[in-house]
Amino acid sequence: MKTFEELGVSPEIRRAIEEMGYENPMPVQEEVIPYLLGENNDVVALAQTGTGKTAAFGIPAIQMVDPNLDRRMAQILLLCPTRELAVQACEELKKLAHHTRGVHVCAVYGGAPIERQIVQLKDANIVVGTPGRVMDHLRRRTLKISELRMVILDEADEMLSMGFREDIETILTQAPENRQTILFSATMPKEIMNLIDNYQKDPVWWRSTSLRLL
Ligand code: AMP
């Protein structure tokens, strides 16, 4: 088993990980982190809650943020099916980014006043959100995704069963072509395979034992 240092995780994030009490990487983290850090790669992971998936995509996402870019431009977009999951992922990313300079995370979701989110979006380079509210901010131009470097779909199957397919496709179409796209899902129905075929570039697959080429 490798250490977080051997996976290429930055000293700032390792300090945060230590404070969070994580000792060793979980399997999905061991496989996915070096792959996402190393190259401009797309990943599909069949992973359920409890596998450590949030840190598996969250650590590379935080490490990829360029603190010198315009703070108002989102660099990373993480889409989650529900408000609860968005809040939870946002909290974990904030903890992981605690010692990393220039990384600002915010969450946008429905059922909460939009004004506060508009203020927070002005200073966030990592945005976590539910697809409906993200679309709302895109329409209002309070979220700009023209500089995105990474889009992560978390619990993609859940998002599709909640009726977010159209929103997700609109967001992926508007995001820059050369972004990285990462998809995590507990199941792989046909609709997910369609998303992978249409919006990811030669993704590598992770399914509980190893990364495999598609
Ligand atoms: P997730 O699959 O992202 O929902 O994570 C499941 C739980 O595992 C969360 O409570 C994380 O805080 C925790 N966790 C993530 N990575 C590690 C790790 N390397 N060691 C111990 N706990 C972890």
Image: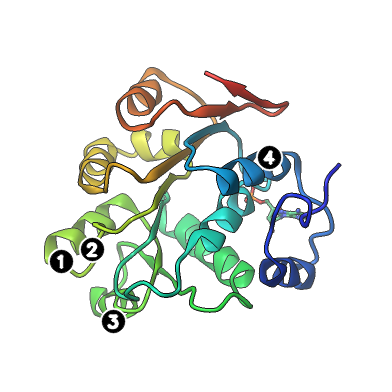
Q: Quadrant of residue 128?
A: bottom left
Circle 2 Cα neighbour tier, 10 Å, few/some/many (<14 / 14–19 / ≥20) = some
The circle drawn on residue 28 is: 4
Circle 1 Cα neighbour tier, 10 Å, few/some/many (<14 / 14–19 / ≥20) = few
Q: Quadrant of residue 194?
A: top left
Q: Which residue is drawn at the image coordinates 54% and 62% (left, top)?
A: 62
The circle drawn on residue 144 is: 2
Q: Are marks 2 and 4 in contact (CB under 8 Å)?
A: no
Residue 161 in percent (x, y) is at 36, 33
Q: Which residue is mark 3?
A: 119
Q: Quadrant of residue 95?
A: bottom right
Q: CA distance from mark 3 to mark 4?
A: 35 Å
Above/below status of 151 relative to 127: above
Task: Say which label, 3 or 4, has the lower sequence index.
Answer: 4
Task: Say which label, 2 or 4, has the lower sequence index.
Answer: 4
Amino acid, disc 1: Arg
Q: Which residue is mark 1?
A: 141
Above/below status of 45 relative to 126: above
Looking at the rendered structure, the secondary structure element under dot 2 is loop
